[in-house]
Image (spheres, grey):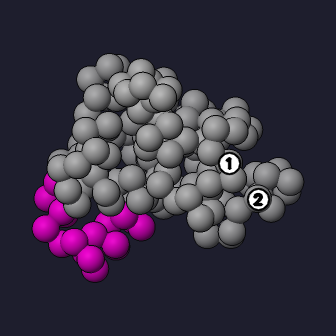
Amino acid sequence: MRIFLDANILFSAAKSAGAVRELLALAEAAGHALRADAYVVAEAQRNLAAKAEEGLPVFDAMLARIEVAAFQPFALPSDVASMLPEKDRPVLAAAVRLRCDVLVTGDRTHFGSLYGRRVEGVTVHSPLTLAQALGFIRP
């Protein structure tokens, strides 16, 4: 499975050795491909530098194990784009463009209405629902 990681997932995994970091390690160990693009990587790096600088070395090590694509503008269909604020559209667009099966995001405010839904071939998950879908924890 190809799993696209939102910036808040990268931030959380780099900031502390908690559940999100464990989820990514389990997914990687199970053979799932972790993906991101330069847009979410830059956002995560900016936020770490501002809020949790101690996580930057962990972040750099994580990036070595994640397939990071260059940012390329990619237009979502207007009905899909209208479901998200403009700043979040590139995240879903990248997951679609990179042919990911899943987008995992902790952004319940903007993506919460899409949790569990398949949008343009990508199923949107929270970290918890992804862990459940992958069989790492029971629903």
Where's residue 77, x and y in %? 82, 50
- The mark that comes first in sequence, 2 or 1, is 2
Q: Nearer the viewer, mark 2 or mark 1?
A: 1
Residue assigned mark 1? 114
Q: Is residue 119 visible?
A: yes
Q: Residue at x 55, y 35 (%)?
A: 102
Q: Secondary structure at mark 1?
A: helix
Mark identifier at residue 83: 2
The answer to whether 70 is drawn above or below residue 120 in the figure is below
Query: Which quadrant of the structure image shows residue 60?
Result: bottom left
Magenta range: 42-58
User: Type of residue at label 1?
Assistant: Leu
Where's residue 67, x and y in %? 38, 39
Do labels 2 and 1 touch, CB within 8 Å?
A: yes
Q: Residue at x 41, y 59 (%)?
A: 8
The answer for how far apart the CA atoms under marks 2 and 1 are is: 9 Å
Q: Nearer the viewer, residue 28 or 70?
A: 28
Where's residue 2, x and y in %? 49, 29
Q: Residue at x 48, y 29 (%)?
A: 139
Asked if the magenta segment contains residue 86, the reply would be: no
Q: Secondary structure at mark 2?
A: loop
